[in-house]
Amino acid sequence: MKSLKEHFEDCKTRDERNRAIINAIEDDYKQVEVAKYLGISGSAISKVLVAMSKKSGDS
């Protein structure tokens, strides 16, 4: 499993960060762990997950 640093070190845009959030969650990191690492709220992580799932459902 990649560290959170490895997940996020190359993110330059919000879209890249959001994809990295999804990947970190899929790697079994908890939303609260990702939120704390990024310095954002847990609800912000939830919003990313919902938005990204809607975005992938549009295909």
Image: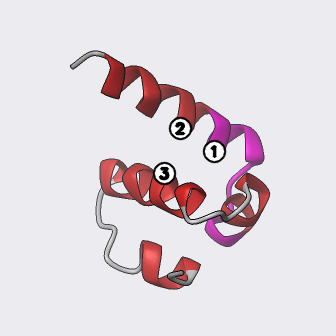
Question: Local crowd at mark 3 within 10 Å, few (<14), some, or many (≥20)?
Answer: some
Tell me the element at label 2: helix
Identify the residue shown where x is 43% and y is 60%: 20
Q: Amino acid at mark 1?
A: Ile
Circle 2 is placed at which residue position? 48
Q: Which mark is in front, 3 or 1?
A: 3
Which is more N-terminal, label 1 or label 3? 3
Residue drawn where x is 60% and y is 32% of the image? 47
Residue 18 rendering spot, x and y as whole percentages: 43, 49
In the image, which is nearer the foreground, mark 2 or mark 3? Answer: 3
Q: Position of residue 41 (x, y in %)?
A: 74, 49
Image coords of residue 54 (percent x, y): 42, 20
The numbered mark at residue 45 is 1
Inspect the image, locate mark 2, and give the three-letter code of the amino acid beneath it: Val
Colour approach in the figure:
secondary structure
Q: Which residues are magenta?
A: 37-46
Q: Quick check: 57 left or right of 24?
A: left
Contact between labelled residues 1 and 2, with CB atoms less than 8 Å apart:
yes
Query: Residue 6: which quarter of the image?
Result: bottom left
- Could you tell me the amino acid type at mark 3? Ile
Q: Label 2 crowding class (10 Å Cα cut-off): few <14, some 14-19, many 20+?
A: some
Is 16 situated above or below 46?
Answer: below
Q: Residue 22 has which mark?
A: 3
Q: Quadrant of the C terminus?
A: top left
Q: Is residue 58 above or below residue 20?
A: above
Label 2 to label 1, Cα distance in Å?
Answer: 5 Å
Q: Is residue 16 magenta?
A: no
Point out the image quarter for the N terminus.
bottom right
Q: CA distance from mark 3 to mark 1?
A: 9 Å
Q: Specify whether residue 40 is painted magenta.
A: yes
